[in-house]
Image: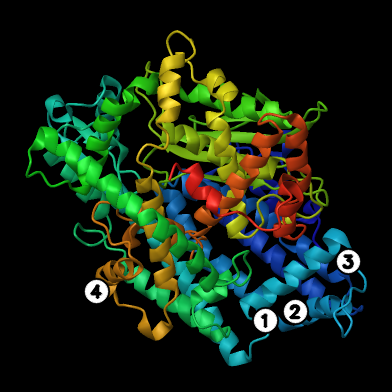
Amino acid sequence: MMMPFSACQKTQRENPLLQESTLPFGAPDFTKIQTGDYLPAFEFAIQQTRDNIQAIVDNTDSATFENTILAYEESGRLLDRVSRVFFALTEADKTPEIGEIEKKVQPMLTDLQNEIAFNKPLFERIKKVYDNEYSHDNSYQGLTGEDRKLTDEIYKDFVRQGALLPDDKMARMKEINLRISDLQQQWGDLLQAAVNDAVVWADKKEDLAGLSEADIAQCAKDAETRGGKAPYAIVIVNTTQQAILTNLDNRDLRKKVYEASIHRADGTNKHNTYAIVSEMAKLRAEKAEIMGYPNYAAYSLDNTMAKTPENVYAFLKNLIAQYTPKADAETKDIEEYARKTAGADFNLEPYDRFYYSAKMKKELLNISEDEVKPYFNVDSVLINGVFYAANRVYGLTFKERTDIPLYHPDMKAFEVIDKDGKSKALFYTDYFRRPTKRGGAWMDGFQKQSRQWNQLPIIFNVCNSAKAPEGQPSLLTWDEVTTMFHEFGHALHGILSDCQYNKLSGTSVARDFVEMPSQFNESFASIPEIFDHYARHYKTGEQMPADLKERMLSSINFQSAYALGENLAATCLDLAWHMLPSKDVPSAEEAAQFETEALRQIGLLNNQIPPRYRTSYFNHVWGGGYAAGYYSYLWTEVLAVNIADVFAQRGALNPATGQDMRDKILSRGNTGDLMKMFSDFTGMEQPDASSLLKARGL
């Protein structure tokens, strides 16, 4: 039996992380939580989880859904709450103190995970419940609905972790899990240091010619926050290409910025992640081999929509074949354009591409980023764009809550109210970059929705846009606008969840489905009614003029081969590393050459279109949960485009269609077959991949 919260001893009463929050929705109270609370909270919650697991094992009654499956679902509830608060900070506000605690906590959590995953008496009880639900001919026997799905998922999780392995292989799996956890911790620390150190300094304002006054002011502010080695600093973002290269006239400085980006963590400077990459790839491959798979990709993809690496490669190779001639033509056009002003012998380099592409875009379409940015104020995009679309389509309204404590002053909190007037969720935003935040953008939650736990979702979005100096507006690029819509699509998947069990709710779906709601939600950014509502000048509040709007929207897919190519290259790098048997994984010294050869073999070695992430800073793969899964962004883009087509046919802002989307997909979490959810909504038996290139203007 789980220990009730009231029965816990002195530690719990004094530690706010171990008490039920009295705030609305059960929100974490950051006015009470201190850094020193985290480690004892983890120690207590881990021990409570152990006690709860032991209680399941010690139960002498026959294994049932209630005393085994449901008890297991309940066993780590307190630990889940503590972990969600702490790891939100390790990603978004990782102070040195938080980093030191993480180093202590991660091995503790991995030990616990190993103990549970390889607890034979526990698995025997779970297996008895699972086996009792099926007869010898696999016909349905007992549980229904979410009870049955929960049983299936828990049983299959144990099997995938190695619960059916013999003792010697179990022991090795424990060692591998612990070492991978340690390596991922090292990776996160090293990559964050590499990004923070990859700053490019400028001594004079003239060096930044071509940048807007707002961007120059941002460089001055970044210089202050990065130590002030020079008056101006260009901060590196997590992707290979840097948006600032679009307007930077100084070619030598463009080159420095680009090289700082691609060499941030390959040992050219002091940071080198290749040793971690090599060891982690080898351990993952060994783990797959122990489980009976030829490589980690085969193991990882076995419980996804794609099912096999062969299916993914077939999908990718079809895209590559259609993309390549368009990419070559795009590069040729840019280089020929550049030679008109730079000279007939000018050779286009990757750090030149954004710069000349933008000038070409300006000349051909009469549009530039600086022209439109004044209409993309971050607050207007959020309130008048992201929230407005959710209101029009799903009936949600958003009320800012200034009484909810935040972990950083840049954050905001909003109560989400459903169309029946009832509170639906709490939603936080954390949009501005800082040295303690890792790169990229993401969604997560302090609390998932669960009817079983009488829990409403507490969801947050994190981005890395530049916060303008005091007194100036924080303006976004179009890419940053779509990123906000994207991450809010994930948020909607959590906010609109209506599931019985925590394990099945919200975004707890396969990787190659989870990116669909987010990519679909990007489509609202350019729908005219939504666009007109948020694209307002930060000074006057006036809508973007019709002529500028037409030019801007028509330019979205200008030279779009690049965006597809960088994604394809990163996807193929991810797969290349995870298709290797353990004996063939390259050493740290061979890693760079392996990357080159992998891209050459697939036909994507292109100096002009490098991978969106190179191996040495591919955080999705080595620090996150996308190993052998980065393909899912392209895979789910197909699903998203198909769903957007359905919305367009029925009326893009039709509330009835939004309700249908809620009922059949967004509310259901992982409670049913994912392809059936897609088919039930679209009426399509299979996704139509041809729509992807069309949607990208290719």
What's under tag 3, amino acid-wise? Glu
Give the mark nearest the N terminus, 1 or 4: 1
Which numbered dot is residue 576? none
- Inter-mark Cα distance, 2 to 4: 42 Å
Q: Nearer the viewer, mark 2 or mark 4?
A: 4
Q: Earlier in the sequence, mark 1 or mark 2?
A: 2
* Residue 588 pos. (x, y %): 28, 73
Q: Which residue is mark 2?
A: 123
The correct choice, above or below, for 598 with respect to 686 in the image is below
Q: Is residue 555 visible?
A: yes
Q: Residues within 10 Å of mark 4 (few under 14, many from 20)?
A: few
Cα separation, mark 3 vs mark 2, equals 15 Å
Of residues 290 and 86, the one nearer the viewer is 290
Res. 458 in view: no
Residue 589 badge: 4
The three-letter code of the residue at mark 2 reads Phe
Q: CA distance from mark 1 to mark 4?
A: 36 Å
Q: What residue sits right under mark 3 in the picture?
A: 66
Label 3, label 1: how far apart the Cα atoms are: 21 Å
Of badges 1 and 4, the one in the foreground is 4
Above or below, 548 against 226 in this view is: above
Residue 49 coordinates in the image, percent (x, y): 71, 65
Q: Is 640 rendered above or below residue 632?
A: above
For numbered disc 2, what is the local secondary structure? helix
- The residue singled out by tag 1 in the image is 163
The amino acid type of the residue labelled 4 equals Glu
Vertical side of 237 occupied by 654: above or below: above
